[in-house]
Amino acid sequence: MTNKRILILGGGFGGLYAALRLEKLMAQRPELEVTLVTRENYFLFTPMLPEVAAGDLELNTIVNPLRKLLKRLKTFVGTIEAIDLQGQQVAVSHGGHSHDLPYDQLILALGEGTNFFNLPGVEASCLTVKTLGDAVAIRNQLITHLEEANSECAAGKRQPLLTFIVAGGGFAGVETLGGINDFMREAIRFYPSLRPEYLRFILVTPDEVILPELNRKLGLYAQRKLAARGVEIITHAKVTAMGDGVVELTNGDKILANTLIWTAGTAPNPLITGLPLPKRNGRIAVDECLAVEGWPGVWAVGDCASVCNPAGGFYPPTAQHALREGNIVARNVAATLYGRPKRKPFRYTSLGQLAAIGRRTGVANILGLNFSGFIAWWLWRTVYLSKLPRLEKKVRVAMDWTLDLCFTKDFACVTTPSRADRRATLLSSLETEQAAMRAVKDIVLTRAEFSGLSRMQQMIKHSNLPGNSSSGDSD
Ligand SMILES: Cc1cc2nc3c(=O)[nH]c(=O)nc-3n(C[C@H](O)[C@H](O)[C@H](O)COP(=O)(O)OP(=O)(O)OC[C@H]3O[C@@H](n4cnc5c(N)ncnc54)[C@H](O)[C@@H]3O)c2cc1C
């Protein structure tokens, strides 16, 4: 069959749940050819990312290899370079070469990128919280700064090393800050030259109250709790620049800090920006069945799509929406391929939202009811544990959480040299080797010269050249 090729671009919530639904369909329709194309070979459970950054969970507990989740459909791991909508093919590169993957139906689930608003020094100096690598980088930076600040030589430079600023008061920013605040205050006890009062954690938000996605009451509760734990919250302000260990804010503050964690802006995925598809605020405009109008066979879900909510406005870009959109789009693609006219519109009313703010405290709004404190934190853990794919990972996370109750957090800083570092090391060892070879060559030349000189001496010695008195005398 040549007209049943479905390509899913992106292996996040939208792409994975579309793939899982299509897998079920493939059991009855063997002619279906479905391929999931994505950069990483795993599915990342982003709601638990701040827990990895804060050392509550081991990094492999929140990722699932795609090949363990998807048995029938093909997984293609690579970087999507270009999408040719006219030619119905996608260029994907891996290992230094490129492939063109043709399709009949295309599901775009590429998520979104980060917006640094071209602020001076911000993109180059800050850390983000989007990928597993980001979470590991944050944890490593926290520990590296503790180690550095503890040494005698850092006595005058401690403040910027021990000041951590988070830009953005949404879920990702607040959860990350709450987690790293706990982590550092626990770890600092093991550093004899440092005291908890040296630590500064600052949250910068343009809003009046943090967590605007929830409600004012819960936002104020979270603010009070974080402030009681030593977090400074600066409202009505934005970061304007970062450089030379100084973070500048719109309110005129200049804060000495070497760490800025950026959760303050999203931008469309650059691949989506370049497509000639209808857009709303940079996201692909889809109809209620998640199809792109005017482009038969093209669909979009998740953070890269703009889906109208019949109750008014648009659905928010969250995991809980993306995964349900993935499910619906798979059904609608199948209906289109098999000539079933009835497509299912996307309708979803969120049951609520939850956030963990550290030290067994949370805030939640479920079915319109507010929960805070331990009960909200317990709900957060229960709900997200149930959503994490695969039993193995659920058990690993539950074990990590249980062990966390008995033991202190681990603060070993495990780093692998980056590709650039490895290249630099290789180059410097090559240079050393070349220098050594040049030195050896010099020694060889010197020896050659030396042996040449000795031979000349011998020749002179045995010749009857005038002035060679010794030879003449002996004869
Ligand atoms: C720290 C954090 C915490 C969050 N907490 C919550 C929460 O508690 N509840 C909630 O509902 N939502 C939460 N979210 C939001 C949620 O993660 C997103 O809404 C959701 O991931 C969107 O799913 P998606 O499939 O659209 O995009 P993503 O999950 O971002 O997936 C995009 C996929 O596309 C791939 N991709 C992109 N470009 C390319 C390319 N060029 N080549 C190859 N592959 C590419 C990526 O590798 C990825 O696999 C959180 C987000 C973050 C960052």
Image (tube, rainbow, N blue to C red):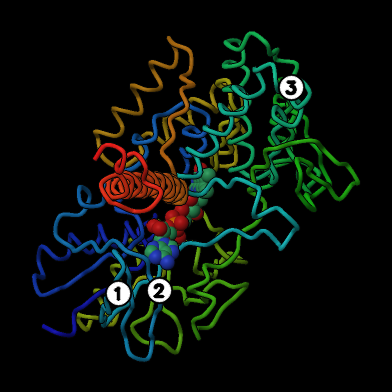
Inspect the image, locate mark 3, and give the three-letter code of the amino acid beneath it.
Gly
Q: Secondary structure at mark 1?
A: strand
Q: Nearer the viewer, mark 2 or mark 3?
A: 2
Going from N to C along the chain, the mark reached first, 1 or 3, is 1
Q: Secondary structure at mark 3?
A: loop
Disc number for residue 81: 2
Evaluate if marks 2 and 1 touch, with contact meaning CB atoms under 8 Å apart: yes
In which quadrant is the N terminus drawn?
A: bottom left
Going from N to C along the chain, the mark reached first, 2 or 3, is 2
Inspect the image, locate mark 2, and give the three-letter code of the amino acid beneath it.
Glu
Q: Nearer the viewer, residue 93 or 345?
A: 93
Q: Residue at x 60, y 43 (%)?
A: 171
Disc number for residue 230: 3
Going from N to C along the chain, the mark reached first, 2 or 1, is 2
Residue lying at the far right in this picture: please name it: 252
The answer to whether residue 341 shows anywhere in this view is: yes
Query: Circle 2: is it few (<14), some (14-19), or many (20+) Cα within 10 Å?
Result: few
Horizontal relation, residue 130 to residue 200: left or right: left
Inspect the image, locate mark 1, and give the three-letter code of the amino acid beneath it.
Ser
Q: Nearer the viewer, residue 12 or 115?
A: 115
Q: Residue at x 37, y 38 (%)?
A: 62
The residue pinned by badge 1 equals 98
Q: CA distance from mark 1 to mark 3?
A: 51 Å
Ligand 1 has an atom within 8 Å of the beta carbon of the residue at disc 2: yes
Q: Is residue 241 placed above or below 275 in the rendered structure?
A: above
In which quadrant is the C terminus drawn?
A: top left
Q: Is residue 181 placed above or below 346 in the rendered structure?
A: above
Location of residue 26 by image quarter? bottom left
Query: Circle 3: is it few (<14), some (14-19), or many (20+) Cα within 10 Å?
Result: some
